[in-house]
């Protein structure tokens, strides 16, 4: 196979997914209007993820987050530490 054909075969799935995402976002924009995207903090897992945010909600500000306040071992063990005391 020629190098151009191999390159086209490799790039085609990425191009199709990019086009699909663009069409999907355009249709969402036409039906729902402008969207605000931002970070949302999940307190149960201590992680953030990017999602659409409604006008009533406030976006998560990473500068306000103190990672030392979240202790993963305490969240997983729960009452196990209390039994030892």
Image (cartoon, rainbow, N blue to C red):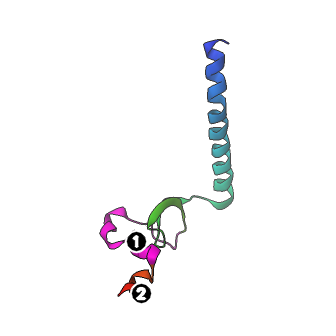
Q: Report the span colored magenta.
A: 55-77
1 or 2: mark nearer the eye:
2
Residue at (67, 45) in percent of width and height: 23
The answer to which image quadrant residue 31 occupies is: bottom right
Residue 59 within the segment the image draws in magenta: yes
For label 1, the SS is: helix
Q: Are marks 1 and 2 in contact (CB under 8 Å)?
A: no
- Looking at the image, residue 65 sits to the left or right of residue 76; the answer is left
Viewer-proximal residue, 85 or 79?
85
Query: Where's the N terminus, which quadrant?
Result: top right
Q: Residues within 10 Å of mark 1 (few under 14, many from 20)?
A: few
Task: Please tell me whether residue 57 belongs to the stretch shown in magenta.
Answer: yes
Q: Quadrant of residue 35?
A: bottom right
Residue ID at (66%, 55%) = 28
Q: Residue at x 62, y 35 (%)?
A: 14
Disc with the residue nearer the chain's start (1 vs 2)? 1
Q: Is residue 39 visible?
A: no
The quadrant of the rendering that contains the C terminus is bottom left
Quarter holding residue 72: bottom left
Of residues 84 and 23, the one nearer the viewer is: 84
Q: Which residue is mark 2?
A: 83
**Nearest the camera: 41 or 36?**
41
Farthest-out residue, front: 84
Residue most extreme to the top: 2
- Residue 67: image location, x then y, percent: 33, 66
Distance of mark 1 from mark 2, alpha carbons? 15 Å
**Which residue has dot 1 on it?**
73
The percent coordinates of residue 4 (x first, y second) are 62, 15
Query: How dense is the environment of label 2, judged by Cα within 10 Å: few (below 14), some, or many (20 and up)?
Result: few
């Amino acid at each position: 196979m020629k190098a151009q054909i191999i390159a086209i075969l490799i790039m085609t799935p990425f191009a199709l997914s990019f086009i699909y995402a663009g069409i999907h976002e355009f249709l969402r924009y036409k039906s729902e209007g402008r969207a605000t995207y931002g970070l949302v903090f999940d307190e149960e897992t201590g992680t953030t993820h990017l999602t659409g945010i409604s006008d009533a909600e406030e976006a998560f500000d990473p500068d306000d987050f103190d990672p030392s306040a979240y202790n993963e071992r305490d969240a997983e063990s729960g009452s196990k530490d209390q039994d030892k005391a």
